[in-house]
Image (cartoon, rainbow, N blue to C red):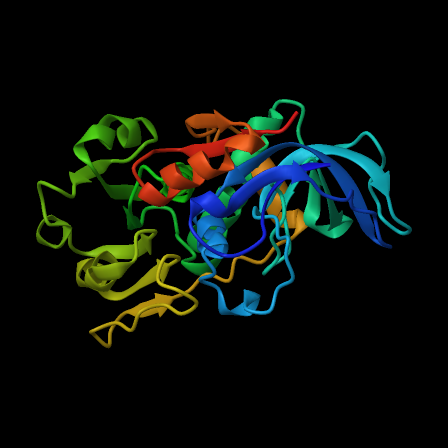
Amino acid sequence: MKAAYIEKFGGPEVLQYGDLPDPVAAPGEVVVDVHAATVNAADWKFRAGEYARHSNVKFPQIPGRDFSGVVSAVGDGADLKVGDAAFGVLGAGKEGTYCEKIAIPAALVAKKPDGLSHINAAALALTGLTAINSVEDTLKLQRGETILIQGGAGGVAGFAIQFAKYLGARVITTCSAANVDYVRGLGADQVIDYNAQNFTRVVSGCDAVFDTVGGDVAKQSFAVLKPGGRAAFIASGAEAPKPDRSDVTALRPPVPRSRKAMERIAEVFMAGGVKPPEVKLYKLSQAADAHRLSQSRHFRGKLVFQVR
């Protein structure tokens, strides 16, 4: 099969394109012929060798975590069948979707609705999984509450804005001036241009914060919470930053993989609760270019490999 892969950790230039062996379905697994896979920030962090758990990996390694495609082989005990259109996210700590075929436990894969294209299913998979786990399962956002979502133009945050509105919350978000209209179109009630305003001076009394930016933005986010408020962080490493006040809670969403989680994404999409993000398409052979843009963080929506 064709794949984009690395033989060593490093910058975008270490990404290669070529042939690697086809995977085989073990018991409980399916092989999926990948139609689309996406670029997530985790992919270039993996490529650069930033994850300690990968310190002893054997090369070559294929980056990538989410996908959509068609089941082409079924292992013993797997409950999907050849020809099923399916989408999902690889198990926690696993990489390997920048390729034409993947083997994955059937229990992590959901059937793709007919009304959702492969490109959009892949674009919603890890972003949707992360946003729903953060907003609904971790923050437990309720109808009528106010949430500040940091970095609204990104893939996860863009899904989160729509999903929080779907749950009946009031949504404030931050972005650059170029993306103000974009995030308003996603449903944000209040938009702060972070280059023109300090969000801590114009926002207060929030029930919840969902931070997708990290760094100083994450640490400053505690200031806008009301007493008893809670904040979830996905860009500050494996643990949430420690709050500088004792009356709020800092949380790190676990983002567990499951078929049920994928089915929740499909359910919300089919109900009109979220629309697919803006998408920029790449070929697998353009993986280095896709990583350069992803690493710059100056884009909106999702970068997607159209594999077939």
Which quadrant would residue 214 be assigned to in this image? bottom left
State the residue at coordinates (70%, 44%). 109
The reply to whether residue 171 is visible in this rendering is: yes
Along the line of sight, the residue nearer the viewer: 66 or 18:
18
Q: Residue furthest bottom?
A: 246
Q: In the image, is 252 to the left or to the right of 55?
A: left
Residue closest to the far right? 76
> Which percent across, then down, holds residue 141?
39, 53
The quadrant of the rendering that contains the N terminus is top right
Above or below 110: residue 8: below
Compared to residue 121, the image places residue 297 above or below, namely below
Q: Position of residue 10 (x, y in %)?
A: 45, 54
Q: Quadrant of the C terminus?
A: top right
User: With 135 as the anchor, is 64 left or right in this view?
Assistant: right
Q: Looking at the image, which residue is at 30% across and 52% down? A: 213
Residue 267 visible, this angle: no
In the drawing, does residue 203 fall left or right of residue 218? Answer: left
